[in-house]
Amino acid sequence: MMFSIIRTGIDATTRDMAVISNNIANAGTTGFKKSEAQFEDMYQSHHNNSMEVATGIGVKTIKPRQSFSQGSLRQTNGSLDLAIMGEGFFALGSPIGRENPDPKTKFTRNGSFQLDRLGNLVNTEGLPLLGEGKTLINIPFTRNADYKDASGNITTRTEMLSEVSVKRDGRIVATYGLDNLVDSGQILLADFVNEQGLKNIGDARFEETPDSGIPVFGFPKERTLGKIEPGFLETSNTDITDEMVTMLRTQQAFNGCSKMLQTDLDVTKRLASR
């Protein structure tokens, strides 16, 4: 019995160490949200007495708790580097042009975006950022514009994309030529009743689950949704100092369990040798 109890302690501290190590490893990952290992005590009840007696039989690990606290903002001055100040997630669609794409919408706080060769606004993995109506946001690199000269004759000119700017409410404005402004869509944000229920799929991306509830979509600055901060990226909310302190405490707990296990084995050997 003692061996199995001590073993649960070793398993728990090992799991805790893995969570802490993952937090530290992703301290530099844009939009990363740290996790905290969670544990529950286990008891064995005996009903042969008139009063119930509960005996502890160890500890078990449960799903790590994710922290969605706001990370600090790092200024990049990139026109398509976007941070969310407040609640909400960017919604990412299925990969463009791939066979058998994953139909599930992904959610992230990593706002590092760029234009692909077709003018679609995508993240670094090629997943498209979704806009109004959960559609792709496309910004053509060229456009045809009609101009009227002094004689009233209309000529068509091809203008090149010169600048893209994003407003705090998610509206995207493209500039063609010197000063021709064209509205190119609006970024969609998603919010959840229970963020803790989201499934972490890696790379600072999440999927909805029955525990999280279905996403509620809206535009930045609507209802409880946050605003967009263009030219910034949200950094990881991992605090290296806190994680190192927790790691030292977990290492001490692991060493204590290991010594208890070794002592239990030594006592068992001595009793068996008699």
Image (spheres, grey):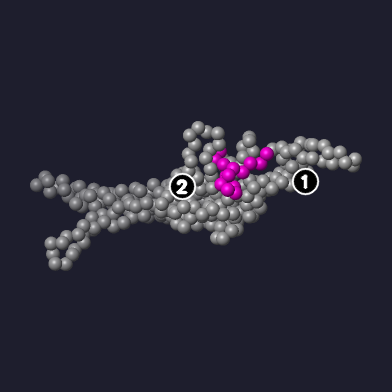
Which residue is located at x 90 percent, y 42 percent?
150
Which residue is located at x 55 percent, y 34 percent?
97
The dot on residue 179 is 1
- Which residue is farthest left? 274
- Which residue is farthest right? 151
Amino acid type assigned to the residue bearing label 2 in the image = Glu
Left/right of residue 258 with respect to residue 96 in the rendered view: left
Left/right of residue 104 with respect to residue 188 in the rendered view: left
Nearest the camera: 199 or 254? 199
Which badge, 2 or 1, comes first in the chain's sequence? 1
At which x and y percent is residue 20? Answer: 42, 50
Left/right of residue 44 with respect to residue 245 in the rendered view: left
Q: Which residue is mark 2?
A: 207
Magenta-highlighted residues: 125-140
Mark 2, other Cα within 10 Å: few <14 / some 14–19 / many ≥20: some
At which x and y percent is residue 117? Answer: 63, 35
Q: Does residue 135 belong to the magenta stretch?
A: yes
- Observer able to see residue 107: yes
